[in-house]
Structures are given as structure tokens and as C-alpha cells.
Amino acid sequence: MWLEILFWSLVVFIFVFGFIYIVIGIGGFWFGIPFIPSNKKVVQKMLEMADLDSTDRVVELGCGDGRLVFDSADISKESVGCEGVFVVALWARLLQKMGKKKGTIRCINFYKEDLSRFDVVFVYLSDEIMRTLYEKKWDEFKPGCRIISNTFKFPMDQVLPESEVMEGKYKLRRYVR
């Protein structure tokens, strides 16, 4: 009897996590960005590069599990994460509830979001999406807005980073509008 319960529990576990894996994979295919969380050292370095204070409004585009959103919420006035893949956004909200963390997670296409009120923008996207973000949103960022990018860059013929820092194998860039 207990072997049968164990067997069916394992089947359900594999099915549920297999389904989530497929949905996340489809989301990565659909939006062009797979879900790859930043490690803690990278998150801390990105927060340092942003030079946050209590008056800053922060957004993370493609926030994944919300690490930067939650950590920046402790420092800033407002912290919002935009995630396009429903299952990943749901996962971030679950982590938020379990950890009683501050911040807001929204399941939304960030191209449709008004980003003009934010002082800091965190991104870990792809070169192609960074190019599209530049074309569609750069002029919307307020003057002085700090954009902190993990690994990927805006088109070099359009804008150069103010600074670049290596954290392990990741190159982090700070742009200022």
C-alpha cells in the first residue's frame, strides 16, 4: 500500500514539475529569454551599481523569481518586477508570500508598461531584446535613470555604458539616461 502511494506521489511530482519546466521553456521561446536566475553575488553587485536610496522607484524587466525586486524593496520607495511568463511570475509571488518580502510582481509585457516614473531599471535579457528595449523605451526613461544590465548590452553604436564590472563570469553594465 505505501509503495503504491509513494509511486503515485512520484508520478504526480514528475508530471507537475515536468509541466512547469515545459511551460517555462515555452515562455523562454515565446519571449526570447529563458528563466536563468542571477546568483546572490551578482544581485548584490547590481544593487551596489544602482546606488539606491529611499526615494528611488525601481523596476526589473524580466524579473524571474524576483530576487532584485525583493532586495531593492528594502532600500527603495517602490520596487516592481515585470515578468511575461505567467508560471515564473506565479513562482515569484509564491516566494514573496513565503518569505514575506516587499515589492510588487506583475505578469505583464514590459514593452506595454510605462517606465517613465522609474529611477532605476534592472535587466537580464538578451542582446536582441536590449536592442528592442533601446529602440522602444530609451526615450521614455527619465533623465538620470540608471539602467543596470547583467551580461547583455544596449547597441554600442547608440549608447555606451558609464561603467562595467565583472562579477565572476558575468559582466555588469551601468548606463545612465
Image (cartoon, helix red, strand yellow):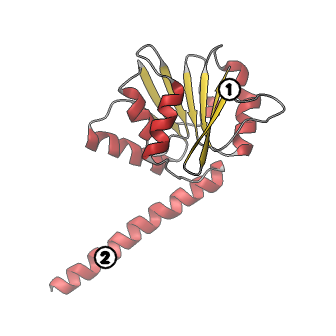
Is residue 162 shown above or below 165? above
Residue 34: % across, % down: 58, 54
- Quick one: label 1 or label 2, which is nearer the N terminus? 2
Please tell me which residue lies in front, 16 or 127: 127
Q: How far is mark 1 from mark 2, CA to CA?
A: 51 Å
Is residue 7 shown above or below 170? below
Instruction: Return the mark for residue 74.
Output: none
Q: Residue at 39% x, 33% y: name it.
A: 71
Query: Mark 1 near mark 2, Cβ–Cβ under 8 Å?
Result: no
Q: Quadrant of residue 69?
A: top left
Residue placed farthest to the left in the image?
1
Residue 74: % across, % down: 35, 26
Query: Quarter holding the N terminus?
Result: bottom left
Residue located beneath label 1 in the image: 162
Is residue 83 shown above or below 121? below
Describe residue 91's horizontal placement relative to residue 114 as left or right: left
Please tell me which residue lies in front, 52 or 86: 52
Please tell me which residue lies in front, 74 or 60: 74
Residue located beneath label 2 in the image: 10
Task: Tell us which disc is closer to us: 1 or 2.
Answer: 1
Count residues near mark 2 (Cα–Cα under 10 Å), then give few for <14, some for 14-19, many for 20+: few
Amino acid tagged 1: Glu
Q: Residue at 33% x, 30% y: name it.
A: 102
